[in-house]
Image: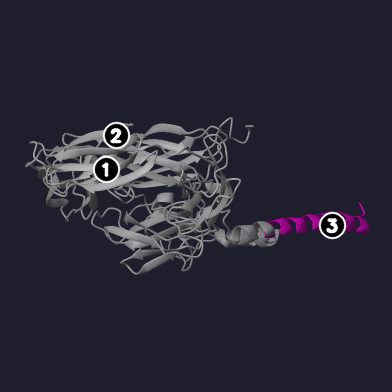
């Protein structure tokens, strides 16, 4: 008979108690981590039966008792579920849940997914939109990013949707999105502020890259020295910024300092230098958009003014008839000169005081719609002057009507497209609006080469239509506008995402009447993903550009639900490993 030592039992019981306490602590932490929500867990990873996990914390005797109760027959019918208990709690092996970034085209949407499983395309599509209903006009959205002229995203900018009385503020990445829009064209606008000039842009509902660019406000300091062709300083030369009333004169050393206000037109002001004894000089100032307000040095060399001579000529029509009252302009960039007059009853014109120079040209506005405008090639004006004969062509008019279709032959309704004649100088574009069936009414246009294109994003265009005088033509114009999506991701050679990369999708195709092209542009998000919407073409030429990486161009076929991964290689000169 053996005798047990009570002190020995206590010594063995201490490690057992400590081990059980440690097990309870680890199980409690694991349970708390699983019950609490967090961005590190997809929505599909959740506890469907918390009581089964709480059982881990029960003593062995209690767990054995629960097991015996579970083995006894239940009074509840097998096909009836206990109230409040999810069917997912039954002991059926669950397939592992994987989050997917892919999306089916709008015409064939995927099954409903949880919030954590929604793809990039699903997040861009309103949740109450019906992808199978082509006539659903209440689920479209417009999204984009607001940048300044240096390409920096601007958070906190209010973007207004004109005509709809709606507005939205950009997030910390400068992005915005306006949902629940009907089909059609809208105008996005940003009002002027103390730091930026305002802007506006036309865009079609459903566009995911309606980016806006704001010109910064501020003053640029410009300084430099003005000398003659021998390098000697030119004093008392007048320096002014075009579009501004501010002006300065050079001192005895030929130096100057002047400030240029940034305008809505851009961040490259133009300086004008004049002096009675020298030719005028006009210089565009190149600035660094990344360091816009650093003082810029501009040195100028002025040439001595040359002798002035006469330039004369006449204006006639295609049959030799004199064109009376035509406005004739004579201009040159070097030397900078501009002269204007009107042709007389014989169609003649004359300029008596023209400085000798190598590059002049004549522009004629006949003032009569029966003639085309005229622009000459460059020609020299020498010591003996010059004689220039102008023969105007007959303008003639034609009539164009037709229908805009997508690449599957369906009408493109309620679209505004602009018509221009590339053969007529300074032709004013004509706005064309399609009806609900995609038709546009006959419009008179000047005979010649016609081009049609959108002014909103995406850029859609059709060219190659040539009309003869008096011709009446009806055309069908296919455009790259549909309901498909192209999703992708840009990564480096190590598989890491490349954010803020520029992705351009281009397409073109020849048709019997026209040549149709499209161009779309967007930026990758912080995880390297990008998305193009409203696509119809079978494939696209993608161009990817990112700072520190080599530019990549590739042909990508459009396949439903596929996700394109584009890998960029580091630029050996500008990349992280370069010098």
Report the residue marked by disc 3: 13
- How far separated are the C-alphas under marks 1 and 3? 117 Å
Res. 52 image quadrant = bottom right
Residue 385 marker: 2
**Residue 357 image offset from top left, x and y in percent:** 36, 35
- Label 2 neighbourhood size at 10 Å, few (<14), some (14-19), many (20+)? some
Query: Which numbered disc flags the more N-terminal residue, 1 or 2?
Result: 1
Q: Main secondary structure of the magenta part?
A: helix
How busy is the neighbourhood of tag 3: few (under 14 within 10 Å), some, or many (20 plus)? few
Task: Read off the residue under disc 1.
Answer: 351
In the image, 377 versus 41, the foreground residue is 377
Q: Is residue 399 magenta?
A: no
In this rendering, does residue 77 appear at all? yes
| Quadrant housing residue 448 | top left
Neighbours of disc 1 within 10 Å: few (<14), some (14-19), many (20+): some
Q: Does dot 2 land on a helix, a strand or a loop? A: loop
Label 3 secondary element? helix
Q: Secondary structure at mark 1?
A: strand
Q: State the residue in front, 340 or 510.
A: 340
CA separation, marks 1 and 2?
A: 10 Å
Q: Could you tell whether 25 is left or right of 465 in the image?
A: right
Q: Pointer 1 and pointer 3: residues touching (CB < 8 Å)? A: no
Badge 3 or badge 2: first in the primary sequence: 3
Given this view, does label 1 or label 3 mark the residue nearer the observer?
1
Q: Nearest the camera: 270 or 201?
A: 270
Q: Position of residue 496 (x, y in %)?
A: 56, 40
Report the span colored magenta.
Answer: 1-28
């Amino acid at each position: 008979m053996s005798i047990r030592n009570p002190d020995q039992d206590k010594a063995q019981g201490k490690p057992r108690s400590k081990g059980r306490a440690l097990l309870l602590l680890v199980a409690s932490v694991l349970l708390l981590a699983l019950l609490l929500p967090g961005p590190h867990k997809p929505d599909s990873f959740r506890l469907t039966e918390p009581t089964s996990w709480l059982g881990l914390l029960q003593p062995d005797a209690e767990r054995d008792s629960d097991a015996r109760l579970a083995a006894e027959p239940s009074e509840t019918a097998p096909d009836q579920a206990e109230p409040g208990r999810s069917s997912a709690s039954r002991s059926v092996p669950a397939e592992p849940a994987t989050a997917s970034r892919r999306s089916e085209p709008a015409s064939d949407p995927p099954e409903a997914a949880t919030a954590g499983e929604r793809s990039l395309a699903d997040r861009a599509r309103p949740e109450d939109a019906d992808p199978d209903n082509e006539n659903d006009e209440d689920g479209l959205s417009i999204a984009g990013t607001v940048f300044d002229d240096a390409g920096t995203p601007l958070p906190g900018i209010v973007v207004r949707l004109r005509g709809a009385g709606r507005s939205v503020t950009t997030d910390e990445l400068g992005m915005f999105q306006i949902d629940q829009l009907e089909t059609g064209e809208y105008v996005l606008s940003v009002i002027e502020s103390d730091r930026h000039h305002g802007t506006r842009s036309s865009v079609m509902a459903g566009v995911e890259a309606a980016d806006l660019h704001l010109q910064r406000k501020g003053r640029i300091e410009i300084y430099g020295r003005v000398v003659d062709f021998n390098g000697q300083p030119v004093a008392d030369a007048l320096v002014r910024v075009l579009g501004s009333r501010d002006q300065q004169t050079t001192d005895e050393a030929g130096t100057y300092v002047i400030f240029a206000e940034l305008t809505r037109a851009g961040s490259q002001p133009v300086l004008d230098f004049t002096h009675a004894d020298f030719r005028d000089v006009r210089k565009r100032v190149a600035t660094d958009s990344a360091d816009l307000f650093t003082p810029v040095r501009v040195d100028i060399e002025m040439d001595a003014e040359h002798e002035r001579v006469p330039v004369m000529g006449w204006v006639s029509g295609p049959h030799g008839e004199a064109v009376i009252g035509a406005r004739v302009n004579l201009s040159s960039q070097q030397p900078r000169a501009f002269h204007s007059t009107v042709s007389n009853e014989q169609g003649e014109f004359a300029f008596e005081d023209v400085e000798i120079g190598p590059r002049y040209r004549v522009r004629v506005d006949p003032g009569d719609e029966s003639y085309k405008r005229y622009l000459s090639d460059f020609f020299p004006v020498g010591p003996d002057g010059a004689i220039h004969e102008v023969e105007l062509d007959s303008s003639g008019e034609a009539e164009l009507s037709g229908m805009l279709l997508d690449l599957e032959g369906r009408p493109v309704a309620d679209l505004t497209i602009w018509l221009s004649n590339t053969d007529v100088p300074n032709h004013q574009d004509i706005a064309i609006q399609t009806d609900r069936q995609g038709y546009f009414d006959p419009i008179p246009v000047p005979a010649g080469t016609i081009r049609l294109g959108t002014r909103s994003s995406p850029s859609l265009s059709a060219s190659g239509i040539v009309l003869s005088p008096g011709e009446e033509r009806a055309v069908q114009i296919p455009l790259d506008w549909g309901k498909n999506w192209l999703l992708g991701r840009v990564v480096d050679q190590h598989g890491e995402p490349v954010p803020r990369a520029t992705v351009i999708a281009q397409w073109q195709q020849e048709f019997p009447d026209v040549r149709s092209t499209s161009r779309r542009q967007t930026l990758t998000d912080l995880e390297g993903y990008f998305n193009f919407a409203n696509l119809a073409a079978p494939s696209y030429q993608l161009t990817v550009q990112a700072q520190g990486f080599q530019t990549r161009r590739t042909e990508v076929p459009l396949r439903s639900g596929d996700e394109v991964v584009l890998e960029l290689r580091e630029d050996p000169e500008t990349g992280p490993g370069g010098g």
